[in-house]
Image (cartoon, rainbow, N blue to C red):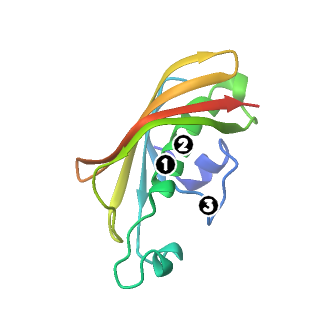
Amino acid sequence: MLGCEEIQKIIPHRPPFLLLDEIDELEPGVRAVGRWRLTGAEDFFRGHFPGQPVLPGVLIVESMAQTGGVAMLSLPRYAGKLAYFAGIDGVRFRRKVFPGDCLEIDVRIERVFQNIGYGKATASVDGEKVASGTLKFSIG
C-alpha cells in the first residue's frame, strides 16, 4: 500500500489537488487501485452545492486520472515524467458522491503506443459503481 507521501514521489499533484489518499494495489504499467476519503471539509463542498454537497464529476474523473498516472509513472522508463489528459471517452456518472464517502478507484491500462495510452477507469462507493469511462493520456 502507498500513502500520500509515496504517491507524491510518483505523480506531481499536491494538496489541495491531490485527489488520492492511498494506493491499495499497484502493478506498474498495468493497474492501480486507490482510495480517496471525502471528509466533507473539502472546500469545494461549500459551493457545490450549499446545503446539498455533492462531489463534482470532474473531480471524480481527475481522481481516476491520478490513479492511472500512478500506474503508468511508476514504471522506471516514465519516472519523473508527467501524464496529461489527451481525451476522455464514454464517461458516465451513475450515482452521487457525498461527504463521508470513500471513493474507490480502479484503473486498468489497456494499451500504450509510444507515449500515448488508454486506460479503463471505474470509481465506486461501497461496491456500487459511481462513474466509469476510458481515459486517454500522453506522457511527456
In the rendered view, would you say 27 is above or below 2? above
Q: Position of residue 10 (x, y in %)?
A: 65, 41
Sequence-earlier tag: 1 or 3:
3
45 lies left or right of 113: left
Q: CA distance from mark 1 to mark 3?
A: 13 Å
- Residue 98 lies, in percent from the top left, at 33, 68
Task: Identify the element where label 3 is drawn.
Answer: loop
Q: Which mark is residue 61?
A: 1
* Residue type at tag 2: Ala
Furthest residue in direction bottom, as rendered: 51
Please tell me which residue is depicted at 49% across the width and 29% down the height of the picture: 119
From this view, report whether residue 129 is shown above or below residue 88.
below
Label pair 1/2, CB-CB below 8 angstroms:
yes
Q: Quadrant of the N terminus?
A: top left
Checking the image for residue 65, the label placed there is 2
Residue tagged 3: 17
Image-based side of 105 in relation to 63, left or right: left
Looking at the image, residue 16 sits to the left or right of residue 104; the answer is right
Position of residue 107 measured from the top left corner of the image (x, y, whole percent):
44, 34
**What residue appears at the point 22 percent right and 49 percent down from the top-left corner?**
128
Report helix, strand or loop for mark 2: helix
Whether residue 21 is visible to the viewer of this picture, yes or no, is no
Residue at 57% in and 38% down: 70
The residue nearer to you, when weighing 94 against 125, is: 94
The tag earlier along the polypeptide, 2 or 3, is 3
Look at discs 1 and 3 and give the one toward the viewer: 1
